[in-house]
Image (cartoon, rainbow, N blue to C red):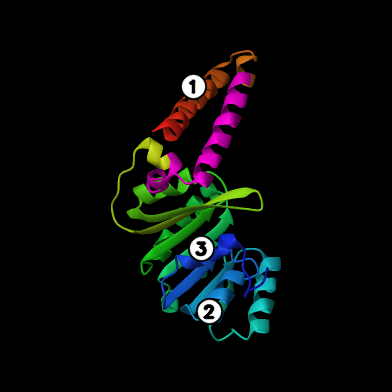
């Protein structure tokens, strides 16, 4: 993968970036996404934020090699603290992490979102954490996408400022994904249902402590919700 040939996952993320935006890509790794957005002339400028020194140095090298040093600022910083006021960032992308980590990044750096109009999050697992963060912090989900690549299923959640309330089923599976229920969506939740049933069956064979009892109740609730997803 390079800045001209992204994975389908990152291409999908890029597709939700508005023309002429100024993007901060948090956890940018090799800065492939910002370089792609500049290469395709989709954005005016970008910040590539990376907390780890190795990926930061890799991002710097890639930006220089592409000749984009004037358009992309690479910063060694923790999460949204890569964004500075004079960057005029209006769009944030965070891809390739767990949902809880993305939610933590958004929460800890939310003061840096004052000028941001759109957040595009691509969690690898447990997207619910991002939806819950959105509800609690005045962001609404305007678009969702699900895709499969290299045997893995990914979700993309696009948020803009606004108030929204979602039911538990919507928080878990996605309010907009529920309206379309693509083949990939069905595959994801059939797999989740199978795994949760397997875990529940395993717990039924163990000595029931309070912790096990609580876990069984949670699993039963999740299973009921997923069955509702698949049958309605």
Give SS at disc 2: loop
Mark sitting earlier along the chain (2/1):
2
In this rendering, does residue 149 appear at all? yes
| Image: magenta residue range | 172-201
Element under disc 3: helix
Mark 1, Cα crowd under 10 Å, few <14 / some 14-19 / many 20+, is: few
Q: Is residue 106 above or below residue 183?
A: below
Q: Is residue 76 visible?
A: no
Q: Residue at x 46, y 43 (%)?
A: 128
Main SS of residues in magenta: helix
Q: Residue at x 45, y 49 (%)?
A: 130
- The residue singled out by tag 1 in the image is 217
**N-terminal label among 1 and 3:** 3
Q: Quadrant of the N terminus?
A: bottom right
- Which residue is disc 3 drawn over? 13
Labels 3 and 2: the sequence-earlier one: 3
Q: In the image, residue 175 lies at what x, y percent? A: 37, 45
Q: Residue at x 46, y 56 (%)?
A: 106
Height in image: 183 above or below 196?
below
Q: Is residue 19 left or right of residue 76?
A: left
**Image vertical order of residue 17 relative to residue 226, above or below:** below
Q: What residue would you read off at disc 2? A: 40
Question: Of discs 1 and 3, which sits in the foreground?
Answer: 3
What percent of the width, then of the height, locates residue 119? 43, 61
Q: Is residue 197 magenta?
A: yes
* Residue 45 part of the magenta segment: no
Q: CA distance from mark 3 to mark 2?
A: 14 Å
Distance in Å between CA atoms under marks 2 and 1 = 50 Å
Does 95 sit left or right of 171 as displayed? right
């Amino acid at each position: 993968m390079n800045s001209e040939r992204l994975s389908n996952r990152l291409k999908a993320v890029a597709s939700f970036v508005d023309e002429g935006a100024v993007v901060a890509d948090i956890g940018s790794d090799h800065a492939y996404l910002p370089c792609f957005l500049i290469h395709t002339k989709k954005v005016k400028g970008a910040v590539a934020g990376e907390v780890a020194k190795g990926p930061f140095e890799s991002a710097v090298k890639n930006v220089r090699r592409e000749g984009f040093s004037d358009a992309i600022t690479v910063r060694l910083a923790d999460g949204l603290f890569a964004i500075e006021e004079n960057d005029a960032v209006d769009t944030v992308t965070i891809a390739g992490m767990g949902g809880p980590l993305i939610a933590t990044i958004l929460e800890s750096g939310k003061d840096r979102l004052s000028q941001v109009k759109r957040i595009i999050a691509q969690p690898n697992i447990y997207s619910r954490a991002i939806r819950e963060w959105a509800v609690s912090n005045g962001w609404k989900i305007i678009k969702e996408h699900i895709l499969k690549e290299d045997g893995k299923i990914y979700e993309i959640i696009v948020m803009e400022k606004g108030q929204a309330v979602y039911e538990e089923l919507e928080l878990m599976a996605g309010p907009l994904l529920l309206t379309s229920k693509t083949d990939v969506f069905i595959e994801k939740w059939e797999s989740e249902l199978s795994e949760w049933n397997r875990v529940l069956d395993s717990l039924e064979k163990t000595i029931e402590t309070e912790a096990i009892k609580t876990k069984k109740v949670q699993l039963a609730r999740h299973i009921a919700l997923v069955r509702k997803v698949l049958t309605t």
